[in-house]
Image (cartoon, grey):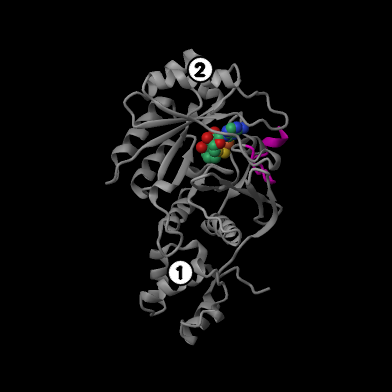
Amino acid sequence: MPNNQYKTNLLNLNQQALTKLFESLGEKPYRVKQIMQWIYKYHEFDFDKMLNLSKKLRQQLNDIACINFPEVSKQNQALDGVIKWVIDVGENNFIETVYIPEKDRGTLCISSQVGCSLACTFCSTGMQGFNRNLSTAEIIAQVMIAKQYLSTKDKRISNVVFMGMGEPLLNEKAVYVACDLLLDDLAFGLSRRKVTISTSGVVPALLRMADRTPVSLAISLHAPDDTLRDELVPINQKYPIKELLLACQNYLTAGTQERHILFEYVMLEGVNDSTAQAKKLATLLKGLSAKVNLIPFNPFPKTQYQTSKKVTIASFQDVLFDNGIRTTTRRTRGEEVDAACGQLAGRVVDKTKRTQE
Ligand code: SAH
Ligand code: SF4
C-alpha cells in the first residue's frame, strides 16, 4: 500500500483548487481539464495511465497527490429497484447511499456525515449519535460508486439530494466543494435545480449557503409551531421557526436565478398530523415560494412513533391545497433494504456518547 497520508487527495478539490495546484506545478490550465476528464469521465485513478499528461507531470502527481476512494462494503437492491450501498469510511464507520429510480428520473440520496449530532427524535441516524464529518472525497465517492455501477445497467443519476446520513450544513466546507463538483461540467454536470441540500435549519450556515452555492434547498420543518418543533427537531431550540423562515426569505432573494424551497414534513400519527396543524402550517408558509413534501414516517426499531394513516395524510394535504400551497406526498420506497429516508443508519462509532445515555 502506498503511503498517501501526506498527499493531496484530488477528489477533495474543485476546479478552482485544482487550477491552483496545477499552477503551483507550473502547468497550464488545460491540464486541469485533462485530469478532471480522467477522474470523472473515465474513472481512471492511476496517474501513470493518464497518457496525455507529460511524464514529468505524472511523476510529480505520484509524488504529491493521490486519488483515494472508500470501499463498498455491501450493495443491496430492493424489488422496486431501489439500491443501497453501505460504504466503509474506515475505523469501523459505515455510511449509506441510496439510489431511487422513478419513471422520469433517478435520484441519489447521499450522506454528509458519519451519524448526526442533531438528534431529531424520529430519525434513526440521529438516534445513533455522531462520529465525524465526511470529506468532499467521501461525499463525491458516493456519487462515483453509484454512477459507475448504474452505467453498467444503463441507468443514470439525474438528481442528487443530501438526504442521507448527517446534517450537510454542519459540514459546510466539504459539502459546498462537493456541490461545486456536482455542478461542474467537467465532473458531474448536474443543473443547480437537480442538486438539493436538505437541512433541519442551521440558520447561520443557511445564511452563508445562500451566497456560496446556487443548489436547491429543502427545509426539514416537521412542525408548525416552536413548542412541537423544539421537541421533534431539537436544533429549533437554538434557531426557532421565525429565524429559520427569515433565513429562507434571504435564500429566496439571494442569487441571480429564481429560487424555490421545498419544506419537508414527516407525518407522525397523533403528533403533527391534525388538520388544525395543517392550517397553522399553511399560515406559516403563506407568501413564501414554497412547496411542501409530506413524508410518511419510516419506522425503525425502538421508535416511539407511528406513521400517520393514509386518510389523515390526505386530509392534511387537502388543507394545504385549499390554502394554495403546492403539496406532494412521498411514496415509501426501498423497504426491504431499509433504504427509506431517515432509516439510514450505517454503523456509527458514536463520539457524542449519546447512545450510552
Ligand atoms: N439532516 C438533514 C438531511 C438528512 S435527513 C435534514 O434533517 O434535513 C433527510 C430527511 O429525512 C429529512 O427531511 C428528515 O427529517 C427526514 N427523516 C428523518 N427521519 C425520518 C423518518 N424516520 N421517516 C421519514 N423521514 C425522516
Ligand atoms: Fe440529523 Fe437530519 Fe436526522 Fe435530524 S433528521 S437527526 S438533522 S439527519
Is 194 displayed left or right of 266 in the figure? Answer: left
Q: Position of residue 93 (x, y in %)?
A: 68, 51
Q: With respect to residue 114, does 330 lie above or below?
A: above
The residue type indicated by label 1 comes to Met
Bounds of the magenta span? 343-357
Question: Residue 332 is drawn in which quadrant?
Answer: top right
The residue type indicated by label 2 comes to Ser
Q: Residue at x 40, y 39 (%)?
A: 204
Gap in angstroms between the C-alphas marked 1 and 2: 50 Å
Q: Residue at x 36, y 49 (%)?
A: 212
Is 10 displayed left or right of 326 in the figure? Answer: right
Q: With respect to residue 32, does 121 lie above or below?
A: above
Quarter of the image with the N terminus is bottom right
Residue lying at the far front of the rendered structure: 103
Q: With respect to residue 278, does 260 lie above or below?
A: below
Q: How many marks?
A: 2
Is residue 65 in view from this perspective? yes
